[in-house]
């Protein structure tokens, strides 16, 4: 039986806080820069992450400045068979920020994704750019 190998490309993705109650314009400069392998449909590739995980990172931004550096991690379990998260300290269990249904979202400019922060709050972000990493 032949296996189909999917292609992916490493991309730098910018996520910025989307507009919400109390923030009608969103919050430019508040969000994340991440590098991840995206497949031809704009979804994060688990196979690409497995082969290039050392290149998959995240920077949390406040006011446009990097305030935390971490890794894009994938853990077994959760909806769709896995959970994407931002891990800032591999020694601290439960401090991760978790992508809400990341496996179902295409990371293309203008799309929206949600992230559950370490406090358990789910916040919405807009994909503002996707460029080659």
Image: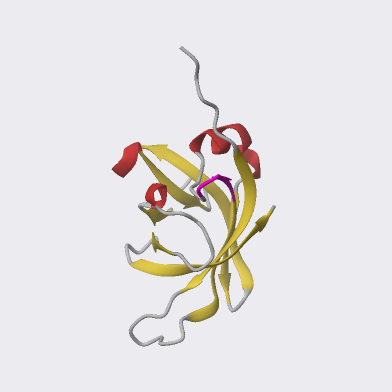
Residue at horizontal 47%, vertical 69%?
Answer: 126
Q: Residue furthest left?
A: 79
Reply yes or no: does residue 39 show up in magenta: yes
Q: Would you identify the image quadrant in which residue 53 lies? A: top right
Residue at horizontal 54%, vertical 33%?
Answer: 6
What is the x, y in percent for residue 26?
A: 46, 81
Q: Is residue 19 above or below residue 70?
A: below
Numbered circles on residues, count: 0
Reply yes or no: does residue 131 show up in magenta: no
Q: Is residue 77 visible?
A: no
Q: Residue furthest right?
A: 133
What is the x, y in percent for residue 23?
A: 41, 86
The residue closer to the viewer here, 118 or 114, is: 114
- Snapshot colouring: secondary structure
Residue at horizontal 50%, vertical 80%?
Answer: 27
Residue at horizontal 65%, vertical 44%?
Answer: 55
Q: Is residue 74 visible?
A: yes
Magenta residues, start to end: 36-41
Q: Is residue 122 above or below residue 5?
A: below
Secondary structure character of the magenta stretch overall: strand
What is the x, y in percent for residue 32?
A: 55, 64
What is the x, y in percent for residue 59?
A: 59, 60
């Amino acid at each position: 039986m032949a296996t189909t190998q999917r292609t992916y490309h490493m991309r730098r993705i910018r996520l910025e806080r989307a507009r919400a109650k109390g923030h009608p314009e969103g919050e430019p400069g508040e969000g994340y820069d991440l590098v991840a392998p995206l497949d031809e449909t704009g979804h994060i590739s688990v196979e690409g992450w497995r082969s290039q995980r050392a290149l998959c990172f995240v920077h949390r931004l406040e006011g446009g400045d990097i305030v935390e550096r971490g890794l894009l991690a994938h853990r077994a379990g959760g909806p769709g068979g896995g959970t994407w998260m931002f891990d800032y300290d591999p020694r601290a269990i439960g401090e991760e920020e978790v992508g809400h249904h990341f496996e179902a979202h295409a990371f293309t400019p203008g799309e929206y994704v949600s992230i559950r922060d370490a406090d358990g709050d789910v916040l919405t972000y807009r994909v503002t750019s996707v460029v080659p990493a």
